[in-house]
Image (tube, coloured by chain):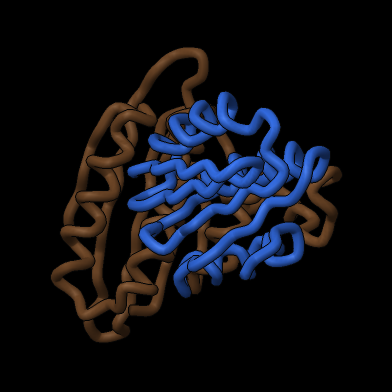
């Protein structure tokens, strides 16, 4: 398992993505899967950076675990911000016209659609969100 | 991310390459804000674009709304990963993709 702890700020996004990609480089995952994971990691980290501690600041922990037997990657995001379950959010209507489209919620929707599993729990004052992707 | 603009009369081609993400999307948004006056055909050439997240989609959506009022917007050369994101998010139906 590898772990990265950074201040939850959007300007740390590149560091978070680089960390995840370094871990993925050690697996045999395809470029397509890597892009899907990168998008998921970006959407979740940016959500934490934008909302978890607003208007203050706090930290985020990103854990990466590759299960070689099951051939899947597990990435866990932990923050001590306000309780927020992204899975509880209704999916956006992706059939509306450009004029009626709301962009809110689209990021998490993309994560839900592209990952193979997603769990959320709130424990000891922390949001713990795990995404799973088959490699 | 790199942006290259090629103007030809009322047609503007914008080549975007690299990563269009939360960090880079505001740069594209700012670039477009000052570029669309009098443009009736806007072409995004995504041949060099490797990655797009919802922040990039947000810029495409707001630009599509502007172009709906003054002409048309066309997306060209999007790779498979990006097409899949357009697909999942329903953007395939909002955008004109060639």
| Residue A85 visible in the displayed image | no
| Residue A118 visible in the displayed image | yes
* Chain rendered blue: B
On the image, the x and y values in percent for residue A21 come to 23, 59
* Chain rendered brown: A
On the image, the x and y values in percent for residue A2 come to 17, 55
Tell which residue pokes out farthest to the bottom in this image. A69
Residue at the spot 67% in from the left edge and 28% down from the top edge: B37
Left or right of residue B54, residue B96 in this image: right
In which quadrant is the N terminus of chain B drawn? Answer: top left
Left or right of residue A114, residue A79 in this image: left
In which quadrant is the C terminus of chain B drawn? Answer: bottom right
On the image, the x and y values in percent for residue A33 come to 37, 73
Between residue B28 and residue A20, name the one nearer to us: B28
- Where B73 sits versus B67, above or below? below
Residue at the spot 23% in from the left edge and 37% down from the top edge: A5
Residue at the spot 62% in from the left edge and 53% down from the top edge: A87
Between residue A87 and residue B55, name the one nearer to us: B55
- Where A58 sits versus A15, above or below? above
Residue at the spot 80% in from the left edge and 56% down from the top edge: A93
On the image, the x and y values in percent for residue A37 come to 39, 62
């Amino acid at each position: 398992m590898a772990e990265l702890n950074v201040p939850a700020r959007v300007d740390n996004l590149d560091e978070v993505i680089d960390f995840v990609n370094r871990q993925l480089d050690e697996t045999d995952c395809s470029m397509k899967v890597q892009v899907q994971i990168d998008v998921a990691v970006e959407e979740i980290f940016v959500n934490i950076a934008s909302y978890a501690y607003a208007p203050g600041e706090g930290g985020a922990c990103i854990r990466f675990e590759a299960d070689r037997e099951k051939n899947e990657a597990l990435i866990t995001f932990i923050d001590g911000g306000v309780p927020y379950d992204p899975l509880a959010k209704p999916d956006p209507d992706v059939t509306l016209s450009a004029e009626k489209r709301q962009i809110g919620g689209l990021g998490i929707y993309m994560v839900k659609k592209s990952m193979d599993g997603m769990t959320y729990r709130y424990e000891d004052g922390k949001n713990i969100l795990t995404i799973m992707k088959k490699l | 991310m790199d942006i290259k603009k090629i103007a030809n009369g009322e047609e503007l081609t914008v080549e975007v390459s690299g990563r269009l993400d939360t960090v880079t999307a505001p740069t594209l948004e700012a670039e477009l804000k000052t570029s669309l006056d009098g443009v009736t055909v806007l072409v995004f050439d995504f041949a060099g674009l490797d990655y797009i997240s919802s922040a990039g989609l947000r810029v495409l959506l707001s630009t599509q709304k502007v172009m709906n009022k003054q002409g048309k917007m066309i997306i060209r050369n999007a790779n498979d990963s990006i097409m899949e994101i357009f697909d999942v998010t329903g953007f395939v139906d909002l955008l004109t993709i060639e």
